[in-house]
Image (cartoon, grey):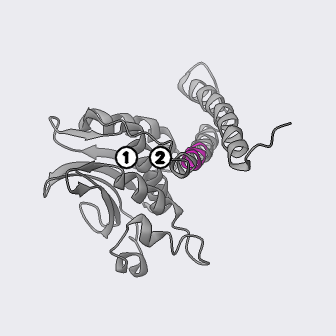
Amino acid sequence: MDKLDFSTILASSIHDIKNSLGLILTNLEDLLGNPANHIADPRQASLLQHEARRANANLNQLLIFYKLGQDQLCVNITANPLDEFLEEIIAENRSVCQALGLRIDHQCDTELMGFFDIELVRGVLEGAIGNARRYARTQIQLNAELMEGFLVIRVEDDGVGFPPSMLAQTDYRPQTLSSIVGTPGHTQLGLYFAAHLAQLHRQGDKCGSIRLVNGHLLPGGCFELWLP
C-alpha cells in the first residue's frame, strides 16, 4: 500500500465532514423555513444551525490553508454587484441573528461594483460576522464603499469594540500575524486567514489588506477588508 501524506488524508476527511455538515444545514434550513413544521423551540434550532455553519466555516478555512500550503489555491476574480452580494450574505445569517436577538442589515450604493473572488471574500466576511455575533449588543451592519482607490467592505457591531492591544497592532500582514498565531493568549487564526485571502487580491502595485478599528458607523468593533 502506498504511503499517503497526512495532510492529504486530512484534506479528504475535511471534504467528507463538510459534505455531511452541508446536508445537515440544508435539512435545518428546510425545517426552519417550512411553516408546516412545528418546532418546539425555533431559537434552539437556529442556534444549532449557527454552530453547524460555524463548524462548516472553520473546515472551509482549513481547506483553504491546505490549498495555500500546496500552491493549489486559484483566485477567480469576477465583477460583483455589492448590494446584491451583501444582501445574500445577510439572508444567510438573518435567522441565526434573530435567534440571538440581533438585527443585521447592510448599507451601500446600489450601483457599487467590486472585482474580487466571491467565495474567498464570502469566507472572510462569514468569519467577521461570526465574530461580531459574539460581541454585538443589538445590531450588526455590513457596508461597502470606494475609498482611496480601494473597495472597502466593513462588518461592524454595537458591542464594546476591539481591545486596545488589537487596535495597537496596525500591521495585519500574514507575515506579521504568523508570529503570534498559536501564542498563548492569542487566537488570531481568523485574522491570519483573512489577511492571507485579502493579500491574494492584487492590481498593479496594490494588494488587499485588513484593518481593525472601533466606532465607524456603529459604536463597536469594525472589521475592514480593503480590496484593490
Front residue of 67/96: it is: 67
Disc 1 is placed on an element classified as strand
Which residue bears the numbered disc 1?
104
- Could you say where residue 186 lies in the image, as x and y percent from the top left? 55, 74
Marks 2 & 1, CB-CB < 8 Å contact: yes
- For label 2, the crowd category at 10 Å Cα-Cα, with few meaning under 14, some 14 to 19 and many 20 or more, is many
Q: Position of residue 160 (x, y in %)?
A: 40, 71
User: Tag 2: residue type?
Assistant: Cys
Mark 2, residue position = 97
Q: What is the x, y in percent for residue 113?
A: 19, 37
What's the magenta region?
56-63
Quadrant including the N terminus: top right
What's the residue at 63%, 22% (across, down)? 37
Residue 65 relative to residue 48: left or right: left
What's the mark number on residue 142? none
Determine whether 34 is above or below 90 in the image: above
Spatial CA distance of label 2 from label 1 is 7 Å
Which residue is painted at 14% across and 35% down in the image? 111
Residue 36 percent across, percent down from the top left = 60, 18
Q: Residue at x 76, y 43 (%)?
A: 4
